[in-house]
Image: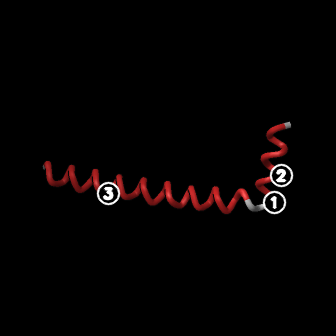
Amino acid sequence: MLHQAVLVHGFWTEFLFFNRAKFAAFVVNGIRMSFFNNLIADVKR
């Protein structure tokens, strides 16, 4: 049981790490795109 819990915890840790990395890359690329710059400008108004 404990071994299975450790595997599940490791899976979720890895899953969250990769999603965070993908999201960070998306944000970095998104800042350079005009669509996102326009969206940010509209939100600030």
Question: Would you say the residues marked 2 and 1 are in contact, meaning their CB atoms lie under 8 Å apart?
Answer: yes
- Judged from the image, the secondary structure of the residue bearing numbered disc 2 is helix
Dividing the picture into quadrants, the one containing residue 4 is bottom left
Q: Nearer the viewer, residue 28 or 9?
A: 28
Looking at the image, residue 24 sits to the left or right of residue 18; the answer is right
Q: Amino acid at mark 3?
A: Phe
Q: Nearer the viewer, residue 11 or 38?
A: 38
User: What kind of residue is marked 1?
Assistant: Ser
Residue that carries the numbered disc 3 in the rendered image: 11
Q: Give the label on residue 38, or none.
A: 2
**Image point 42% across, 56% down: which residue?**
17
Q: Residue at x 76, y 54 (%)?
A: 36
Q: How is the image coloured?
A: secondary structure
Q: Earlier in the sequence, mark 3 or mark 1?
A: 3
Q: What's the mark number on residue 20?
A: none
Q: Are marks 2 and 3 in contact (CB under 8 Å)?
A: no
User: Which of disc 3 and disc 2 is earlier in sequence?
Assistant: 3
